[in-house]
Image (spheres, rainbow, N blue to C red):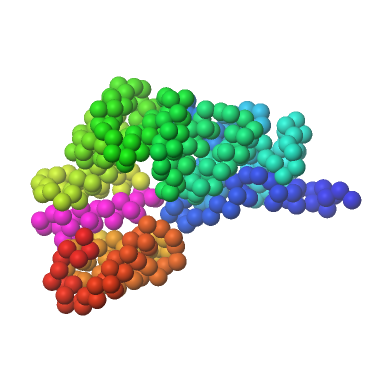
Amino acid sequence: MSAHKHDPTGAGHLDGLQCHFTWELEHSRELLFSIRDRLEDLLPNESNPWKGYIYNLLGFLQTRLGRSDEALSLFSAASEALRGPALLVNYSDLAWLHHERGEPTLSQEYLQRMQELSKEYPTERDQLLPEVYAEKAWTQTEFCRNYTLAAWLFQKALEAEERVEWRSAQVLASFYVKKKKGSEFLEQLRHASERDPENLPLRAGYLQQCTRSGQEVGPEAKVLAAKVLQGPDRMHRHMESLLHLYRSAVSVHAAVDLATKALDKRPDSRFLKACLAMCHKWRIHQRAAVSQELIERTVALLHEVITLYPDSCFRTEIDLANAYAKSNHGLADAKLLYSELLRRDLEPRSKQILYNSYAKFLHFELNDSHMSTQYHLRAAEIPVKSYYRSNSIETLQKIKDRGVSDLELRERHSFFE
């Protein structure tokens, strides 16, 4: 007997669809907001080759934030942006959305569209369409930051069809997998960059890798920066990767100047304000002395960024607390902000970030090594794999190896440096 007779909504078939609703995309609300804001900053660029994917992922994010009307609008925008087999994920998402909205007729309609599209573009058993592999891979990079899986999925797409943007994305995903950094991979980056000369993050990644291998790339980094500054506004979305390159290949001071020039061209861009705040943060935390004027400017800019990203400003608030601590008269403000953050009901990942940062604040700014150790322990005990947990564990291991007492720790301010 047909499954449709038992399940007229098509819900019995939904779990087997390839779409955002079945890819096990789970995050805290804070991270959902953060991903949403990052993607929304990309959307003004109509020429973005991932535009349809962005709309699809934003639509899914809105469903998880309880905003189904906004989700429907975004999924519809994706339907307009995508063509042919690339619509398979979109139709599957819409079937799921209407099912969750209690609209079985519309859910069944999109399920039927998906099935017709699958017949039009058949695949071998247990294989997906290359467009589905590619969107799933892109989603892994943007939502999960699972670059290992993303690189594998992009490779699966490329085995069926070679596309420049997929090849570039596959190489970039491999670049973010920390273990893959040899000379052979450097050559892969170079070839991919030459095939996709307009992909500035890819070029920046290649130059970053050259820097790590001891090559001088400062002049080329400056040429790349001039290209971004002189190009159309849509090129400014590449500023973050370029600033990271500048930090390592030129200087933090030059990165601040570059971000300032970009913001002068687009003073209404919240993304560029966040980029400039990032550079100021790098600068005030350098070992070199910085002026109180620069610290005050950084504090003011961080305040503004918090207002521009009200739903995803948690890490910026931590940055603000640490900037306060650098000021001659801001230590009380730093302590107050940290105490407010510590009282919040946070997700485990956010708690881990906060505990790690607060531990450093306690040690470096308040000279309280005992409580610093306690917060490193709290960060390490949260079973979430991250840089922050690894950093706290490494710090605790140093304490254990040296066998330093709390009293000695208070007297040795460079212990954690």
Q: Is residue 76 above or below residue 415?
A: above
Q: Position of residue 14 (x, y in %)?
A: 70, 49
Q: In the shown orientation, is residue 318 left or right of residue 121?
A: left
Q: In the shown orientation, is residue 209 left or right of residue 383?
A: left
Q: Quadrant of the C terminus?
A: bottom left
Can you tell which quarter of the image residue 372 is in? bottom left
Kindly give the residue lying farthest to the front in the view shown: 183
Q: Position of residue 333 (x, y in %)?
A: 19, 60
Return the residue nearer the eye: 243 or 170. 170
User: Mainly helix, strand or loop, the magenta region?
Assistant: helix
Residue 120 forms part of the magenta stretch: no
Magenta-drawn segment: 310-336
Query: Residue shown at 52%/42% (left/top)?
Result: 151
Q: Is residue 227 above or below residue 297?
A: above
Q: How many marks?
A: 0
Kindly give the residue lying farthest to the right in the view shown: 1
Can you tell which quarter of the image residue 416 is in? bottom left
Return the residue nearer the eye: 387 or 42. 387
Query: Residue shown at 17%/58% (left/top)?
Result: 325
Residue 312 visible somewhere in the drawing: yes
Q: In the shown orientation, is residue 289 left or right of residue 379?
A: left
Query: Residue shown at 74%/34% (left/top)?
Result: 122
Q: Position of residue 157 (x, y in %)?
A: 60, 36
Return the residue nearer the eye: 21 or 128. 128
Q: Position of residue 81 (x, y in %)?
A: 57, 29
Residue 370 visible somewhere in the drawing: no
Return the residue nearer the eye: 35 or 143. 143
Q: Is residue 54 above or below residue 344?
A: above
Query: Residue shown at 58%/42% (left/top)?
Result: 153
Residue 333 forms part of the magenta stretch: yes
